[in-house]
Amino acid sequence: MTTPLLETDNVAYTYPDGTAALAGVSIRIAAGSKTALVGPNGAGKSTLLLMLNGMLRPASGEVRFSGRPIAYDRRSLRELRRQVGFVFQNPDVQIIAPTVEADVAFGPVNLGLSSDAVRRAVKGALGYVGLDGYERRPPHHLSGGEKKRVAIAGILAMDPAVLVFDEPTNTLDPASSEEVMELLDELASSGRTVLISTHDVELAYRWADSVVLMERGSILARGSPEEVFSDHDLLAAARLKPPALLDLYNELGLLGIVAPGTPPKCVLEFTDRIERAMHGRAPARCEPGAISVCDADRIDAAHIRALVEQGTVAHVGAMGTRAKEFAGREQIFLDYTYGVIDKCILKALIGENSLIITTGGMVEHARRRIGEYSTGSGRAIRVTTVQEPANDLAARE
Ligand code: ADP
């Protein structure tokens, strides 16, 4: 077995007031994984996360990074915190400077980077979280979602290998929550290891590839979200409810309506299973619609508007904060702002064309995902990447 990037070995912790928070907890976090620590309030999730970059020191047991026990001298902790970034639940705790730029620069400056490197790191991080142009703004006047993104940019500016998020969507409205979770997906798809704590079972089910279920300072279960969340007794012991989609699918399985197998993670997978169960195969009711994908950094908004006005695309979705900002700035109406790829596939299955606006590596990610769906379902959905020149639908098949 390969060495996990981060692990805890039987760590225990009691707060100075005598509250026992962790009673011998061992977790292993693989490089590049998306892990959710799930449990009700008070389960010990935050306490465990705070140990991962040395903010808390276990009373007993050990925390290891890259196979080596972490050391608690100043220098080692500084190096560890560069590698393992921590985003607090409440961004007000994390944001300390009077401007967004100064706040994001704080980490790189402390690392002793040259002023040029600091500037590059700040620009890169703000661009990544979709806050270009916010440099001079006072963080405390921003919305909750924007503050969260400033806090994330501050961590990203140090280019950590691991990002730890304590309750990333708590206190955010649904749209801001989706944006933050999309950002976490982008981070994971760029190869970073992402770890979150949450009591939101729906969110963990959709997002994580590995789940650790916690209650009263101990681990109740670990495994894939499908496995862990299918065990009602375990969930009841943790005072949680199963994710609605999984619960429904499992009940349909018990009724013999769907065959056993890996449960669906999203509505698209769910409808697919039902259709297969009903017809023995994915039905070909009509010729599938096409999905166009474009890069918001490389496309002229007028071109996008033309596609919509000419009726070439019936639905438009944007993935990622920069793509959404592009659409907002250019007044392009968005039908979908989350779960965009799946929504567009669902429309393609009923013969309608869509456009996905996204940025950078997410263009390839979207193409790949649609390609995988086509191969798996046997329904070939045409994907094109919309490119300049602006007055012609030049596309790469
Ligand atoms: P979770 O993140 O799962 O909500 P926590 O790690 O915050 O759980 O808390 C675990 C236990 O430790 C709870 O009983 C909580 O009340 C207690 N606790 C958390 N922080 C402190 C603190 N600073 N002082 C005393 N007790 C604390």
Image (spheres, helix red, strand yellow):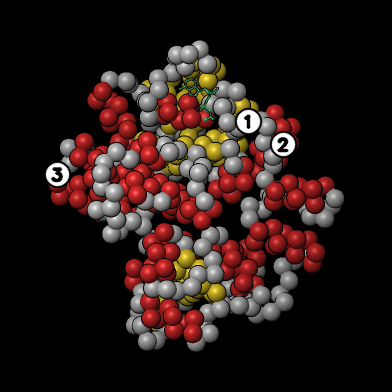
Q: Does residue 156 appear in this view? A: no
Amino acid carrying mark 1 in the image? Ala
Left or right: residue 2 compared with residue 73: right
At mark 3, the secondary structure is loop
User: Mark 2 and mark 1: span between their CA atoms?
Assistant: 10 Å
Question: Which numbered disc, 3 or 2, marks the residue that appears first in the sequence?
Answer: 3
The residue that disc 1 covers is 221
User: Mark 1 and mark 3: span between their CA atoms?
Assistant: 46 Å
At mark 2, the secondary structure is loop
Of the pair 363 and 118, the residue shown nearer to us: 118
Vertical side of 144 occupied by 352: above or below: below
Badge 1, how many Cα within 10 Å: few under 14, some, many 20+? some
The answer to which image quadrant residue 342 occupies is bottom right
At mark 1, the secondary structure is strand
Badge 2, how many Cα within 10 Å: few under 14, some, many 20+? few
Q: Does residue 206 appear in this view? A: yes
Vertical side of 219 occupied by 99: above or below: below
The residue that disc 3 covers is 114
The residue that disc 2 covers is 231
Left or right: residue 278 compared with residue 287: right
Could you tell me residue 15's position as x and y percent? 47, 17
Vertical side of 187 occupied by 96: above or below: above
Amino acid carrying mark 2 in the image? Asp
Could you tell me residue 111's position as x and y percent? 21, 36
Could you tell me residue 75's position as x and y percent? 24, 25
Question: Which numbered disc, 2 or 1, marks the residue that appears first in the sequence?
Answer: 1
Badge 3, how many Cα within 10 Å: few under 14, some, many 20+? few
Q: Residue furthest front?
A: 141
Residues at discs 2 and 1 in contact (Cβ within 8 Å): yes
Residues at discs 1 and 3 in contact (Cβ within 8 Å): no
